[in-house]
Image: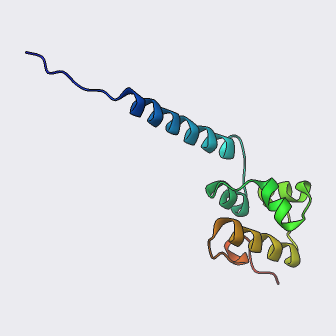
Amino acid sequence: MQKEHSINFDSLVQNNRKIMEETKVSMMFRIGKKRTKYGEFLDDNKIFQERVSEETGLHRDTMTRVCNNPEYIVRKSTRKLLTDAARKLSGKNVRPEDFWPPMG
């Protein structure tokens, strides 16, 4: 005698949609990008560079450099803006030293 299994298809569909959405978001934040510590922080916390740009008033080209170019030297005043934005948008207590070496 074979046992009948009750399958809740609505639950399966909903779970599948959730997994697909999480995968899409994950891919959107990581594919083909070489990132700085600040860029990785934004990715890990699902924060768009554009949102940080709006929050800080920094140009999107500056945001691209800050997030993708480890050779780019970020000014002290810009570090403060970016750290304050990261703190506000993520809710995490971060410091400039979490992203950049101390300034000499």
Rendered residue at 58%/38% (across/down):
21
Q: Quadrant of residue 87?
A: bottom right
Name the side, left or right, on which 10 lies relative to 102.
left
Name the side, left or right, on which 86 lies relative to 23.
right
Picture coordinates of residue 91, whole percent (x, y): 63, 70
Name the side, left or right, on which 21 lies relative to 43.
left
Q: Quadrant of residue 92?
A: bottom right
74 to 9, vertically: above or below = below
Q: Quadrant of residue 84?
A: bottom right
Rendered residue at 51%/39% (across/down):
18
94 to 2, vertically: above or below = below
Residue 72 seen in the figure? yes
Assign the C terminus to one quadrant of the image: bottom right
Rendered residue at 25%/26% (across/down):
6
Q: Nearer the viewer, residue 72 or 57?
A: 57
What scheme was used to colour the molecule?
A: rainbow
| Residue at the extreme left | 1
62 to 88, vertically: above or below = above
Name the side, left or right, on which 87 lies relative to 81.
left
Picture coordinates of residue 35, whole percent (x, y): 72, 54
Picture coordinates of residue 102, whole percent (x, y): 75, 80
Picture coordinates of residue 3, whole percent (x, y): 14, 21
